Image (spheres, rainbow, N blue to C red):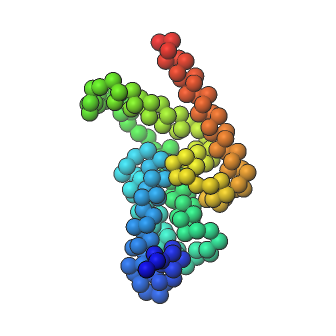
Amino acid sequence: MAEASDYELLDRYAGGDEPAFEELVRRHQKTIYDLAYRMLDNHADAADMAQATFVQAFLHHTTFRRESSFRTWLFQIGLNLCRNAIRDRARQQHENVEDLPLAAPHDTFAVTAAAQARDRLGSAIRTLPERQREALLLRIYHDRAFAEIGTIMSCSEGTAKANYHHAVSKLRRVLVADEGTRELS
């Protein structure tokens, strides 16, 4: 028996079949969590945001016009919630935890080098303007097509491509400059 489409599951849910919505959550929760984690850089916040995304989808499923895929609609909801969370974060004062000593899980060169490279990349991504960061994350980490990225970000496909290419160019410049200053020290 063929797997029900997202639209079929939505129709079944609208008809009173509650497990149909649970199946939609199971189908898409990892993708939405991954998006939230890439945007928020925190597992607990990402889990909360993924849950909030599905709560919003649950509450507003009747307003979904089906002009895009259900997954695209979820991305739009999740991206908007993440944007709001980032703005809220910026308004709050945070304790500086960079001075706190952290225990390293392994003290090998390879693990340390890989962690440093991930940290440099993550830091560089966080410096990108919001729209460029979003386009990059949706393209690289979620393998979305530019047309879908445009839909998710409420812009044209061309604007999505431009944001992505500007992001890649800036990352390249930042990482190359960072590598140059690391070699000098």
Residue projecting furthest to the top: 184
Residue 135 in the figure: left or right of residue 142:
right
Q: Above or below — where is 72 with respect to 93?
A: below
Evaluate whether residue 89 shows in this view: yes
Considering depth in this image, is 145 or 157 the residue closer to the camera?
145
Which residue is at 54% across, 77% downward? 7
Which residue is at 44% across, 71% downward? 24
Residue 133 in the figure: left or right of residue 28:
right
**Which quarter of the rendered picture does the N terminus lie within?**
bottom left
Which residue is at 67% across, 39% downward? 166
Which residue is at 41% across, 73% downward? 23
Q: Position of residue 56 (x, y in %)?
A: 48, 68
Considering depth in this image, is 45 or 148 the residue closer to the camera?
148
Tally the marks.
Answer: 0
Q: Position of residue 79 (x, y in %)?
A: 54, 56
Task: Kindly indicate the quadrant of the structure image that contains residue 47.
Answer: bottom left
